[in-house]
Image (cartoon, rainbow, N blue to C red):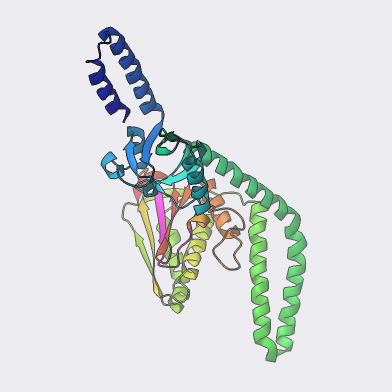
Amino acid sequence: MLRESLAKLESTLDHSGVPQADWEDALLKLKEINFALDEALIVAITDVKGNITFANRKFCEISKYSKDELIGQNHRIINSGYHSEAFFREMWRTISNGKIWRGEIRNKANDGTLYWMDTTIVPLLNERGKPYQYISFRNDITDRKNTEEALRRADKVSIAGQMAAGLVHEIRNPLAAVMWSLQLLRSDIPERQGEFDAILEELDRADGIVGDLLTLAKPHDVCFELVHISDILKPLVNMVRNEARRQQIDLQLLIAEDVPVTQCDRNQIKQVVLNLIKNAIESMVQKAGTITIRASRSTLDGVDIEIADEGCGIPEEVIAKFGEPFVSTKKFGTGLGMMTCLQIVQSHQGSIDVKSELNVGTTMTVRLPGVVSKAV
């Protein structure tokens, strides 16, 4: 937009009688400013309805849309769904009243990646003081937001661990006593066996939560060894196949021929994959379908373990808090199991990626570093 305006200004000045040296010097300064803006800021101009009329090169780069794809579109084209309608109503209320709006917005690029923008929107006013277009100036603050998020999660993990350290032994001992007493009563009163089983099942679930808390309070040491990932996946899938079949779920295991050996704690990675498969099965309650477990070589010669289900999916707001304690899609879930999985994988210098679509399914990908190129 500024480039086109400069061209028009140059043509006008050429016929204005202003000394050529003066206007050429002024134009050079304006072109330098334009270049600096284009290099430093993400700039867009919209009309009063919010339709994009100009987008600079950096806008196209970060959004991964071409200029032709952006022009004429509303900014909803990059809406990530993260912010509420009230957030945008307040923004529009501010700029439509001729005031400058500043804030931080999370957007979604054309390829689905998310990024954060420190945004300033400036309304340009006509002679009646009414906005006729808006210019937005943005800076990419994704790295800063990711760092803040990592610190926030680390604080939550630390707090949960401190709580766990004080509570685990206080809870587990009386819990074990209650379970033992109920098992004795169950054998003495067979006609109430169903009720005792229901109570014991809930107590067993509580004991599992205590176990997760214990892991947070005192993580196990990692015992690394060279492992063929198929040696973990094949027996694990066979172990849970019957449970899946009872829910009319087919488990498919696909292992690529070129999967490299990885260095990991066999039992811990088994725990992670088992947890993810069980979560996938639970997401498909009363819904027959397929869960695919796929192992492949990653682009960095590591190992990718993908668990893809056809279940209910995970809302974006839950994905955004993935790995935090007490965040779960399950009715009585605590999120501690998934948090433990993430801690284990991170202790292996790996990561867990989540992709999900509501009512379509979820894909969890565990990424582990490789150590040698030898194929499985």
Residue 266 shows up from this direction: no
Q: Quadrant of residue 185?
A: bottom right
- Looking at the picture, tell me which residue is in the foreground, 4 or 330: 4
| Label total for image | 0
- Magenta part of the chain: 303-315
Give the percent coordinates (x, y) of residue 186. Answer: 71, 84
Residue under the point 53% across and 60% down = 271
Name the foreground residue: 31 vs 251: 31
Q: Is residue 266 left or right of residue 158?
A: left
Residue occupying the far bottom of the picture: 191
Relative image position of residue 126 (x, y in whole percent): 40, 34
Q: Quadrant of residue 306?
A: bottom left
Q: Is residue 198 visible?
A: yes
Residue at the (32%, 27%) spot, across then down: 2
On the image, which quarter does residue 64 sit in?
top left
Q: Based on the picture, tell me whether residue 362 belongs to the magenta stretch.
A: no
Q: In the rendered image, which quarter contains the N terminus? A: top left
